[in-house]
Image (cartoon, rainbow, N blue to C red):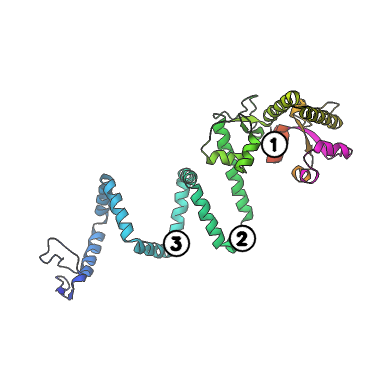
Amino acid sequence: MTKICSKCKIEKPIEMFFKSKSGKDGLKSQCKECNAKYDATHYEANKDKIKTQSMEWGKNNKDKRKIYMAKYRKTHKESIQKYGVEYLKLHKTERQKYEAEYRKIHKDKMTKYQVEYHKINKDKIKIRDAKYRNIHKSESAEYYKSHKHEHNLKTSERRKSVRLEVLMHYSNKTMQCKKCGERHIEFLEIDHINGGGSKHRRNENIGSMYHYLWSNDFPEGYQILCSNCNIKKVKIAAKIRGELGTKTQKRDYNRNFKLRLEVFSHYKTDDKIKCSCPTCNVDDTDLLCLDHINGGGAKHRKIVGNNMYRWVRDNNYPDTFRILCHNCNQSLNNHGYCSHDIK
């Protein structure tokens, strides 16, 4: 079946005409091509008016708009994707500029959204990333090599921000040790209130406690302590086990206590067993530990075992060790400097 267009006067198949309830034959009098030309010229002549009307209608009919757009996206999925690809090719530089400006203006909003999205879709993201890495193995490896420094900096910044967020939450924004009130942020750490931190990390295979707490919406049962107060809590529990435990536990506790004092007495500063940091006066032996002056303590322990005090005594007290409190030791280990040195 055919029909003559009232505009161009050309006979065309009825498929070339839009449907219309007001038309006698149920079709518009103008063909699709002529109708499109008319719409284009009308839009150009009345652009501002149409835009304001459209925006007003969208504000007043949000639900209708959502339903309409959802239906449209379903029925026109392929054409929308095709148009999107073509548009990006033609307007690549414009799009990049727009996105850069948008990120500057809405940086906090985007970060907040990404954090929330990651928490909700954590497993989904892991599966997606794993699939991508398997498909693009060689490309990923090359990219990482060429952007290694940049990647490490970003990772470091992300870890710092997560740690700060966790410390802020569990200290009720005071950023201080719950027991002694220590405020140097480098000395602060997470403590399991009811103990069992090592077992928990081992059973849950936790790499970073801060990331675990952050990604699990800050569960209860944790507090902020400085490294000294945290180790003091451990030492008190060990002392109780040594006094009330079995014969073997008592013997091991007394032997280790004497060994620690023996090693400390060799490395003492100014004839005193105390932290060798010039601005730190900690002399409680429970809060002191041996420190590798040139670093590399973790690697050394892997070679000689966990009883470093015995190894030091058996090897005639090498001069590569010193006494530090746990606060100074952890600050040097995790941040590369002692917080006491910063004025």
Give residue 45's position: percent from left, percent from top: 24, 59
Q: Nearer the viewer, residue 88 or 309?
A: 309
Residue bearing mark 1: 331
Residue 314: in magenta span: yes
Residue bearing mark 2: 141
Name the kind of residue labelled 1 in the image. Answer: Ser
Q: Residue at x 74, y 43 (%)?
A: 298
Q: Are marks 1 and 3 in contact (CB under 8 Å)?
A: no
Q: Is residue 108 found left or right of 164 in the rendered image?
A: left
Q: CA distance from mark 2 to mark 3?
A: 27 Å
The quarter of the picture where residue 264 lies is: top right
Name the kind of residue labelled 2 in the image. Answer: Ala
Q: Is residue 133 found left or right of 32 in the rendered image?
A: right
Q: Is residue 274 visible?
A: no
Q: Count the numbered circles shown.
A: 3
**Secondary structure of residue under mark 2:** helix
**Secondary structure of residue under mark 1:** helix
**Secondary structure of residue under mark 3:** helix
For mark 3, does the 10 Å Cα neighbourhood hold few (<14), some (14 to 19), or many (20 or more) residues? few
Q: Is residue 65 found left or right of 164 in the rendered image?
A: left
Name the kind of residue labelled 3 in the image. Answer: Lys
The N terminus - image quarter: bottom left
Residue 90: in magenta span: no
* Direction right: furthest residue: 316
Residue bearing mark 3: 92
For mark 2, does the 10 Å Cα neighbourhood hold few (<14), some (14 to 19), or many (20 or more) residues? few
- Region in magenta: 301-325
Q: Residue at x 53, y 51 (%)?
A: 126
Looking at the picture, does residue 218 appear above or below residue 99? above
The quarter of the picture where residue 246 lies is: top right
Q: Earlier in the sequence, mark 2 or mark 3?
A: 3
